Image (cartoon, rainbow, N blue to C red):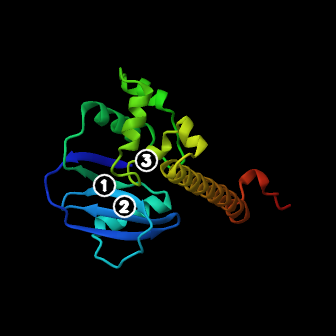
Amino acid sequence: MTLSIEHCLLAPSGSVVLSSPLGNWWMEWCDRGVLATCATTARENNHFVPDWLSDAWNAVWNGEDVHLTLCTPRPLSPFFSRVYGAIIRLLPEPGATATPQEIVQSCGLSGSVSSVVKALRQNPWPLFLPCHRVVTPSSQAQSGPLERISAQLRSYEQSLRQMSSGIADKFTSAKAWVLQSFFPSKESETPNE
């Protein structure tokens, strides 16, 4: 995951609603990056989507590396910047998880776990900045819409991870069979007498 967060005063260039395996998502962008995302019940529309955003969108749903600039019209507080930076650094892989306590420790933050949870809840880019990978007691209880979406995203990423490891296992087995069948090692060859 290659994400950067920048303070940006550019006006929005566009917005779109796209469908995904987990429902529809609204996104707004400017010329420098994504301004905001959120799950929505609005219907998918056929508005223009820049190539860079389309690439990032597809990468998220395919479990691939996302390259994206996340823009914010107001500068983030130093605390939020450190929390979001820790999430980018510690949880780059789909399916990875951490606790708020681990985020606090990794940043050397003096803030409490509840402050980390506040930063998670105020994430303006929930699809791209993977705060859903930080598992809180309330996220496990799935008490509200945000927790349900987070749980669905973690489940989706876990299934992608399992699928890709299964494909890798099958590829390794197939590769071994091809090598053994067509390129036998000298030890397995029987000498002709």
Residue where numbered disc 1 is placed: 68
70 above or below 31?
A: above
Mark in front: 1 vs 3? 3
The answer to whether the residue labelled 1 contacts the one labelled 2, judged by CB atoms less than 8 Å apart, is yes
The residue sitting at 27% across, 52% down in the picture is 69
Q: Amino acid at mark 1?
A: Leu
Foreground of the two, 95 or 35: 35
Looking at the rendered structure, the secondary structure element under dot 3 is loop
Foreground of the two, 165 or 104: 104
104 above or below 14?
A: above
Say whether residue 154 is left or right of residue 113: right
Q: Quadrant of the C terminus?
A: bottom right
- Tell me the crowding category of disc 1: few under 14, some 14 to 19, or many 20 or more residues within 10 angstroms, Cα based: many
- Mark 1 and mark 3 lie on one chain; the one further toward the N terminus is 1
The residue sitting at 82% across, 57% down in the picture is 190
Marks 1 and 2, how far apart at CA: 7 Å
Q: Amino acid at mark 3?
A: Pro
x then y, percent, for residue 128: 38, 53
- Mark 1 and mark 2 lie on one chain; the one further toward the N terminus is 2
Marks 1 and 3, how far apart at CA: 13 Å
Residue where numbered disc 2 is placed: 56
- Tell me the crowding category of disc 2: few under 14, some 14 to 19, or many 20 or more residues within 10 angstroms, Cα based: some
- Dot label at residue 130: 3
- Mark 2 and mark 3 lie on one chain; the one further toward the N terminus is 2
Mark in front: 2 vs 3? 3
Looking at the rendered structure, the secondary structure element under dot 1 is strand
x then y, percent, for residue 80: 31, 35
Looking at the rendered structure, the secondary structure element under dot 2 is helix
Q: Residue furthest bottom?
A: 46
Q: Residue furthest right?
A: 193
